[in-house]
């Protein structure tokens, strides 16, 4: 589906307009002309629309900024059999995502300006949604030598990440944060101590003991997170903790923010809605990294999102094929897809009273756009017309055979959701519609 | 033979271990004395006899061709007998060996030892163990006083003064003894010194020392009278402090465009040896604003002045003086 197909004005009216960037949550409309937002809110409703505008009656629907996913593995280049920018783009649009940030853990990994350019060009040609690239923090993701933050940034990288791995060397992370400061670059690390993780495959708990699986202690995450936050204080760069899983993590983030450390954090929608009990009888689609932990951990993470200790929710989309998942639990690959269930999973937290809709949209659109420095996540006049329209009350059941992603490793097969994306616009063009 | 009236505030120390602690009149005295040697060096006969019969030992624990040759030539032009001791880096076991070597050399009754060592503070330690004069030819990341003096001499000859000049020292400040000595000397003589480079190479601690630091060449070179480039060691440009040569050159290498941010009559300096295409564009290194070759000539003149001054400050008998 091409984004260039449709450029006539669109008037989304009779809607509930939610835009955390302007403090909007109420009846109104959104007018999009020439790929940009012209007006959003009550005034957009009362001022009407140009004559040639397509009017979409959004009674009972919410109109919000398109979601911005800071962490999605795609598979291109190198693992196109798992996911391409075309298939990821279709899935993202169905999940309400208008910008996805692709992780650099590809083959080859994205550690060179020419590769950033290749990925951006390839994605622009084939993806329904906007794709930005997070470059590798170290050359070859080996955790030793810094990549070219300046040149990679000029090529379009929105940040630098350890990807699936974690930077073991404190000195390397310190230098990365120091060097990144000169470019205002974002440094993302997955806080995880590889030695504490060891051969662990799930949360260290009674469940792991019962299943006879090696556990990963929460300290594998919290010791490194505590270290990283102090390194961020020492070096002064912008630090981002990717994919938190442990109950103690939000407290550490709150401490850092209180200290004035420039640190932000993310958690995946799966870690906010699932827990280790879902693994049941060795179900490998629930084998994630970091692992799903206890429900107490999950509740602490939700609370962390609520208070802002954790800034953003990501999909953590990680497509795996049957060959890497249909294995004994300990041998199966980590990861779950999460693009097309992104908004629906997030809405569970609104329906159970944990988060306001405004906070959810903020954590899924406004804040991630701010952190990555993107012109997105807002319905302010002049912003790109990236918009999601959803029915917050519509019940539906996810059926694995309907999944748009190439890889089908969803942890939500057969799950019931309340709230469904009806339309997704990127640059004013409809890229998904039911 | 040039004679000079005794300057009561001039330099009369038995050692030159660093710029730190030198008063502005002492620095100016050394620069003035070096001026005389420049003319001498341009004559067909370049010899003086002020160190005739004296023994100078060049003790280099770190390999150096330029500095050692410069000191050797300086000593010979003053009439001294010069001996080069190249102590291989691998055969040195730091502390104990350093002092053992010093004691051994001391037994040969030299008049001056010129030392380079890879450990900061090593030369001050050695100076405590010998009865002759000691000149620091570079200790670790600490000081390289004769480089700073020759830089100041070069600047003064072109700008007629140092007071009030804006000097941008760019690149690997963190590991540079040249930068430290230059900061001390130029600041003492009234220049405004700025440090420019990535934060990995220009740590925040220099700001705490009261110096202006910049990460962008555009900001750091604005209105600069002097642009002093530092050498970036190869092992520091492959991902540890700087990701790559091309990125370093792109943002911090001195090319004609970046030089245009400085004053139109700004002068370019480099202590050598240069990494062309890393910290400096060959077009700039060899361009009309470059003083790099002249710095080498000034080096011999300065080192003559320093050797002459320290040996003669110790008196004619060679006995230990404070």
Image (spheres, rainbow, N blue to C red):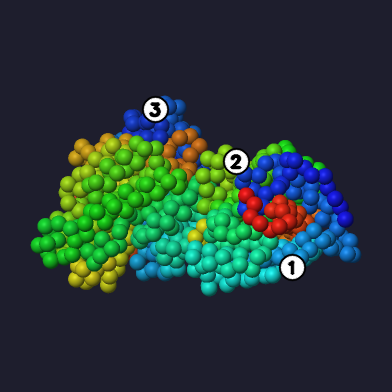
Instruction: Work out whether residue A110 can be spotted.
Output: no
Query: Where is residue B311 drawn, in percent x and y?
Result: 71, 56
Residue A88 figure quarter: bottom left
Element assignment for label 2? strand
Q: Which residue is mark 3?
A: A42
Answer whether labels 1 and 2 touch (C-beta < 8 Å): no
Q: CA distance from mark 2 to mark 3?
A: 51 Å
Residue B39 figure quarter: bottom right
Viewer-side label of 1, 3: 1
Query: Where is residue A83 drawn, in percent x and y?
Result: 37, 64
The residue shown at (72%, 68%) is B82
Chain letter belonging to callout 3: A
For the image shown, how many numbered marks are present on the structure?
Answer: 3
B15 left or right of A56? right
Is B316 placed above or below B96 here? Answer: above
Q: Which residue is mark 2?
A: B212
Q: CA distance from mark 1 to mark 2?
A: 44 Å
Query: Where is residue A228 drawn, in percent x and y?
Result: 36, 50
Residue at the right extreme?
Answer: B44
Chain letter belonging to callout 2: B
Bin the neighbour count of mark 2 within 10 Å (Cα to Cα): few under 14, some 14-19, many 20 and up. Answer: some
Q: Marks 1 and 3: same chain?
A: no
Q: CA distance from mark 1 to mark 3?
A: 93 Å
Answer whether labels 1 and 3 touch (C-beta < 8 Å): no
In the image, B200 versus A291, the foreground residue is: B200
Query: Where is residue A330 drawn, in percent x and y?
Result: 21, 68
> Where's the N terminus of chain A, which quadrant?
bottom left
Element assignment for label 3? helix
Bin the neighbour count of mark 1 within 10 Å (Cα to Cα): few under 14, some 14-19, many 20 and up. Answer: some
């Amino acid at each position: 589906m091409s984004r260039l197909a449709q450029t006539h004005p669109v008037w989304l009216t009779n809607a509930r307009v939610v835009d955390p960037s302007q403090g909007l949550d109420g009846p109104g409309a959104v007018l999009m002309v020439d790929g940009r937002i012209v007006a959003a809110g009550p005034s957009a409703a009362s001022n009407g629309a140009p004559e040639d505008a397509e009017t979409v009656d959004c009674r009972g629907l919410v109109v919000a900024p398109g979601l911005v996913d800071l962490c999605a593995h795609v598979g291109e280049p190198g693992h196109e059999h798992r996911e391409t920018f075309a298939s990821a783009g279709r899935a993202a649009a169905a999940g309400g995502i208008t910008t996805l940030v692709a992780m650099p853990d590809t083959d080859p990994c994205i550690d060179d300006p020419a590769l950033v350019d290749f990925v951006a060009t390839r994605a622009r040609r084939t993806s329904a949604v906007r794709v930005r690239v997070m470059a590798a923090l170290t050359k070859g993701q080996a955790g030793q030598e810094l990549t070219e933050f300046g040149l990679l940034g000029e090529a379009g990288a929105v940040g630098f990440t350890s990807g699936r791995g974690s930077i073991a060397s404190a000195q390397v992370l310190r230098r990365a944060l120091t060097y990144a400061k000169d470019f205002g670059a974002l440094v993302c690390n997955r806080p995880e101590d590889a030695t504490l993780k060891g051969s662990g495959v799930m949360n260290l708990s009674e469940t792991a003991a019962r299943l006879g699986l090696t556990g990963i202690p929460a300290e594998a995450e919290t010791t490194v997170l505590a270290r990283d936050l102090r390194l961020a204080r020492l070096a002064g760069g912008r630090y981002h903790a990717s994919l938190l899983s442990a109950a103690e993590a939000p407290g550490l983030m709150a401490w850092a923010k209180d200290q004035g450390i420039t640190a932000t954090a993310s958690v995946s929608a799966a870690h906010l809605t699932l827990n280790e009990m879902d693994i049941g009888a060795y179900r490998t689609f629930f084998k994630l990294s970091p692992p799903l932990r206890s429900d107490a951990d999950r509740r602490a993470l939700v609370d962390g999102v609520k208070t802002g200790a954790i800034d953003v929710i990501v999909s953590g989309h990680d497509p795996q094929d049957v060959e890497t998942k249909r294995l004994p639990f300990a041998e199966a690959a980590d990861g779950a897809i999460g693009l097309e269930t992104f908004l629906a999973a997030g809405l569970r937290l609104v329906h159970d009273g944990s988060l306001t809709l405004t906070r959810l949209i903020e954590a899924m659109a406004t804040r991630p756009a701010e952190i990555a420095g993107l012109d997105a996540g807002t319905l302010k006049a002049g912003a790109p017309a990236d918009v999601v329209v959803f029915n917050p009350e519509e019940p539906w059941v996810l059926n694995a055979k309907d999944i748009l992603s190439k890889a089908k490793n969803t942890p939500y097969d057969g799950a019931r959701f309340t709230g469904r994306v009806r339309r997704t616009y990127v640059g004013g063009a409809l890229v998904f519609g039911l | 033979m040039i004679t000079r009236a005794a300057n009561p505030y001039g330099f009369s120390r038995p050692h030159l271990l660093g710029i730190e602690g030198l008063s502005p009149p002492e620095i100016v005295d050394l620069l003035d004395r070096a001026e005389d040697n420049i003319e001498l060096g341009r004559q067909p006969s370049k010899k003086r006899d002020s160190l005739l019969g004296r023994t100078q030992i060049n003790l280099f624990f770190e390999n150096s061709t330029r500095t050692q040759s410069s000191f050797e030539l300086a000593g010979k032009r003053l009439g001294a007998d010069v001996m080069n001791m190249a102590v291989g880096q691998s055969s040195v076991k730091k502390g104990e060996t350093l002092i053992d070597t010093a004691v051994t050399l001391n037994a040969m009754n030299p008049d001056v030892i010129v030392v380079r060592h890879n450990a900061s503070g090593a030369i001050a330690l050695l100076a405590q163990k010998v009865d002759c004069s000691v000149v620091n030819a570079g200790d670790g990341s600490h000081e390289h006083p004769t480089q700073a003096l020759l830089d100041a001499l070069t600047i003064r000859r072109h700008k007629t003064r140092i007071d009030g000049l804006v000097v941008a020292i760019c690149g690997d400040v963190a590991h540079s003894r040249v930068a430290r000595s230059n900061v001390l000397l130029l600041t003492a003589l009234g220049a405004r010194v700025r440090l420019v480079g990535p934060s990995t190479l220009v740590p925040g601690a220099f700001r705490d020392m009261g110096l202006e630091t910049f990460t962008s060449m555009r900001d750091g070179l604005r209105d600069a009278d002097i642009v002093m480039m530092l050498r970036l060691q190869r092992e520091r440009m492959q991902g540890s402090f700087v990701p790559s040569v091309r990125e370093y050159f792109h943002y911090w290498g001195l090319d004609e465009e970046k030089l245009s941010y400085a004053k139109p009559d700004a002068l370019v300096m480099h202590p050598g040896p240069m990494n062309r295409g890393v910290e400096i564009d060959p077009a700039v290194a060899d361009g009309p604003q470059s003083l790099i070759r002249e710095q080498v000539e000034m080096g011999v003149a300065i080192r003559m002045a320093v050797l002459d001054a320290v040996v003669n400050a110790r008196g004619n008998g060679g006995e230990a003086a404070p």
